[in-house]
Amino acid sequence: MKPVKIITWNVNGIRAVLKKGALDWVWSQDPDFLCLQEVKARPDQLTEAQKNSLPLPYLWNPAERPGYSGVATFHKNRPLDFGMGLGESKFDVEGRVISTLQAGFRLFNIYFPSGQRGKERVDYKLDFYAHLLKTCDRLHKKGESLIITGDFNTAHQPIDLRNPKTNQKTSGFLPEEREWVQKFLDHGFVDIYRKLYPEKVQYTWWTNILNARERGVGWRIDYFLVSEALVDRVKDVVIHDAVLGSDHCPVELVLK
């Protein structure tokens, strides 16, 4: 059987990457699923030419606020079921979650909140993690196997960012944020990239200032967390850090 290929990418504006032709690389990889975060648009805001350039059917969950957040999941095979959001309005107005049920697993495409705008948003972010974990715990109890992918907006370990010491008080590497990533690992999930490559240093996001990407000053904040039951199905995880078009790069999961 052909492997299942899932690609995740925070595109920081889908209209921008379409204008740059940056999604051409993704389509050349022939993914079974493409999970985009921070699309910053509704489908009706795309031109006809842009819509026609999208070769796969999609589910789209935009934020209510224009030009903000939003996720989209492109899929070759029609999902058995799908859901938008977490069932909590304070999160769902920001268009952060799409879940799709396939034979063998449920895929969550998530744009986790950033805490960069102060304590209120850090608290919102931690509450988001808590609500998601409750949902995942419930699905695990039902016997489902889960894949969570997207922009987690948190680097879990010091190896996951270039400058851990100077960022200990920066949202994205706060102890309380990192603890929530660990809670998912304690509740039946595996950070599959780190399991396969325990010592490898690669990043998935770079600030746009001070030539951070060229200087290798980045963070690994885009993940695939998979249920323990799926670990044996994982063939590889690839961080495509040479692919340009966004301040993030694509990450690919290949399942046997």
Image: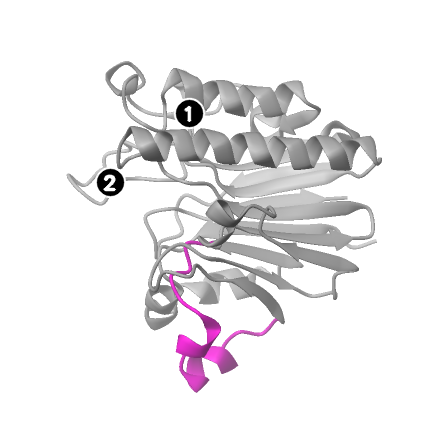
Residue 233 appears anywhere in the view: no
Q: Which of 102 and 89 is in front in this view?
A: 89
Q: In this view, does 52 lie above or below 150?
A: below
Residue 55 on the magenta segment? yes
Q: In this view, does 63 lie to the left or right of 8?
A: left
> Toward the viewer: 50 or 23?
50
**Crowdedness near tag 2: few (<14), some (14–19) or many (≥20) residues, C-alpha within 10 Å:** few
> Residue 251 versus residue 10: which sits nearer the camera?
10
- In three-dimensional space, the C-alpha distance between marks 2 and 1, rounded to whole angstroms, equals 17 Å
Residue at the spot 36% in from the left edge and 60% down from the top edge:
65
Q: Which amino acid does label 2 sit on?
A: Glu
- Displayed quadrant of residue 113: top left
Mark number, residue 144: none
Q: Nearer the viewer, residue 104 or 192?
A: 104
Q: Quadrant of residue 216?
A: top left
The residue that appears at 40% across and 55% down in the rendered structure is 11
The residue pinned by badge 1 equals: 160
Q: Position of residue 97 (x, y in %)?
A: 55, 50
On the image, the x and y values in percent for residue 156 come to 46, 23
Q: Which amino acid does label 1 sit on?
A: Asp
In the rendered structure, which segment of residues is drawn in magenta?
37-56
* Residue name at image x 42 percent, y 27 percent: 155
Most distant residue in the bottom direction: 48
The quadrant in which the C terminus is found is: top right
Task: Report which quarter residue 209 is drawn in.
Answer: top left
Answer above or below: position of 45 versus 136.
below
Q: Is residue 163 above or below residue 131?
A: above
Which residue is denoted by mark 2 in the rendering?
214
Say which label, 2 or 1, has the lower sequence index. 1
